[in-house]
Image (tube, grey):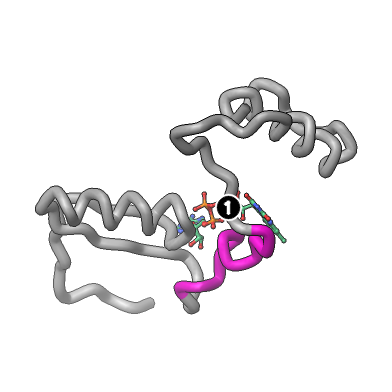
Amino acid sequence: MNSVNSFITADVLILGTGISGLTSAILLAEKGLEVLLVTKEADLAETNTSWAQGGIIFPGPEKVKGLAHDIQAASSHTSCTKAINPLS
Ligand SMILES: Cc1cc2nc3c(=O)[nH]c(=O)nc-3n(C[C@H](O)[C@H](O)[C@H](O)COP(=O)(O)OP(=O)(O)OC[C@H]3O[C@@H](n4cnc5c(N)ncnc54)[C@H](O)[C@@H]3O)c2cc1C
């Protein structure tokens, strides 16, 4: 078993290096906080975010008309309505 002989300290510990973790890390660092990112993968880029070939959908300043319908169509109407409604 490996032993840990040193400690790393930070203001915030973020688990995950996908878009959620990286966005949080940037925003917190911009506020002056020291951020530590940890992931379970050996490769930091091994995330679902890396596989999102169509770009990441997010609720911007303007809601996109018909987006909820498109998401449902793309998922053969298996998407959770409660989760996608805030996007459109
Ligand atoms: C093939 C594919 C295509 C996609 N296409 C699109 C698209 O076109 N448009 C779109 O909007 N969305 C798409 N998505 C969905 C999108 O990728 C995800 O919704 C989004 O990337 C999730 O981001 P995230 O940061 O929450 O999670 P992720 O990107 O999954 O990152 C999770 C992170 O947490 C880490 N982690 C997990 N468990 C642990 C643990 N126990 N300890 C430490 N670290 C851990 C992982 O290693 C990883 O670094 C697609 C997904 C896939 C798989």
Q: What element carries label 1?
A: loop
- Is residue 14 rendered to the left or right of residue 29? right
Type of residue at label 1? Ile
Please name the residue shown 49% across and 78% down the image.
43
In reply to whether residue 46 is colored magenta, the answer given is yes
Quarter assignment of residue 37: bottom left
Residue with the mark numbered 1 = 56
Question: Which is the main secondary structure of the residues drawn in magenta?
Answer: loop
Report the image quarter containing ligand 1. bottom right
- Is residue 63 rendered to the left or right of residue 35? right
Q: Out of 37 and 75, give the one closest to the viewer.
A: 75
Relative image position of residue 10 (x, y in whole percent): 15, 57
- Is residue 62 rendered to the left or right of residue 26? right
Mark 1 residue crowding within 10 angstroms, few (<14) / some (14–19) / many (20+): few
- In this view, 1 is above or below 49: below
Label count reads 1
Relative image position of residue 14 (x, y in whole percent): 33, 53
Quadrant of the frame with the C terminus:
top right
Magenta stretch in the rendered image = 44-54
Relative image position of residue 63 (x, y in whole percent): 56, 30
Q: Out of 64 and 83, give the one closest to the viewer.
A: 64
Please name the residue shown 33% across and 50% down the image.
24
